[in-house]
Image (cartoon, rainbow, N blue to C red):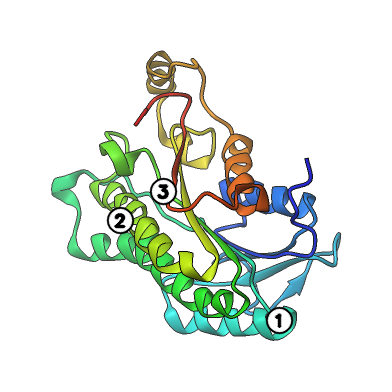
Amino acid sequence: MDLLLKDKVALITGAARGLGQSIAESLHNEGATVIRADISFENCALVASENSKSLFDYKLDVSKQNEIQEMVNTIVNRFGRIDILINNAGICPRTEFDKITPEEWDCVLAVNLKSVFMLSQAVLVHMKKHRYGKIVSLASAAGKIGGAQVGAHYSASKAGIICLTKSMALTAASSGINVNAVCPGVINTEMTTAISPERIEKYKTMIPLGKIGSATDVANAVLYLSSDVSNYITGEILDVNGGLVMD
């Protein structure tokens, strides 16, 4: 199936590893020009990949509005538009509830939730000019049910993404822009390495499909919502969890 991503310009945050890296590869393989933004990169400029003229890296702290605006301006000046925004950047401290400090709470909400608001706001201005755009944000099953293996601030930030997605979808629909979110469950990434093997096996017994998901499983869902084959879908919160959460 042709997902109609050729010549589309896509921005993915938190793209240096894990889910973000897999999502970036999926969009790039479908023909999109991809900008991978991550705080771990070295340069606050569009640096082309050695292997492709349509893959770029950009150093970005998603919690800082001035950096976001500078990056968006740089991308638009270079390519004329941003067609796809994937809000993937996030952190997941596993601090127990009674040990979370206000400073840690603010940090998690700034990186995980406020960044989605700031990035989407900055990009929507340009998407509305072209009356086209796809915004997909990474939420989590923890945003629906809480999470025993993650901090309360992480769960709260992901719940915020779910509601923010619906609010943005209502606002952007009249401009021809689709806004959706993906809710991964237990996925085999760096985030799950902190979970004990015993706990992983217990999760498998709770998941109807009987297995842990892969980064590719999530990337495929994001790819679908980023493409024109999903043009009549907006405000959707798509679960990718093997049946762990059904709603």
Q: Quadrant of residue 39?
A: bottom right
Labelled pair 2, 3 in contact (Cβ < 8 Å): no
Vertical order, 106 against 144 (above or below)? below
- Cα gap from disc 3 to disc 1, whole angstroms: 29 Å
Q: Quadrant of the C terminus?
A: top left
Residue 125 x %, y %: 51, 80
Residue type (three-letter) at the residue carrying disc 2 = Gly
Q: Quadrant of residue 239?
A: top left
Numbered mark located on residue 139 in the image: 3
Three-letter amino acid code at the position of disc 3:
Ala
Q: Neighbour class for label 2 at 10 Å: few (<14), some, many (≥20)?
A: some
**Viewer-nearest residue: 107 or 183:** 183
What separation in Å lies between label 2 and label 1 (alpha carbons)? 31 Å
Give the residue at x 58% y 49%: 225
Up the image or down, 81 lies above or below 206; here it is below
Q: Taking 65 as reference, is 93 above or below it?
A: above
Q: Which residue is painted at 44% across and 47% down in the image?
A: 236
| Residue 73: quadrant of the picture | bottom right
**Disc 1 residue crowd, few under 14, some 14–19, many 20+, Cα 10 Å:** few
Do the CB atoms of the residues marked 3 and 1 lie less than 8 Å apart?
A: no
Q: Nearer the viewer, mark 3 or mark 1?
A: 1
Q: Which mark is residue 221?
A: none
Q: Is residue 97 left or right of residue 143?
A: left
Q: Please give the name of the residue rendered at 64% of the width and 72% of the height, measured from the top-left corner.
A: 82
Element on which disc 1 rests: loop
Q: Is residue 155 toward the left or the right of residue 229 in the image?
A: left
- The residue tagged 2 is 160
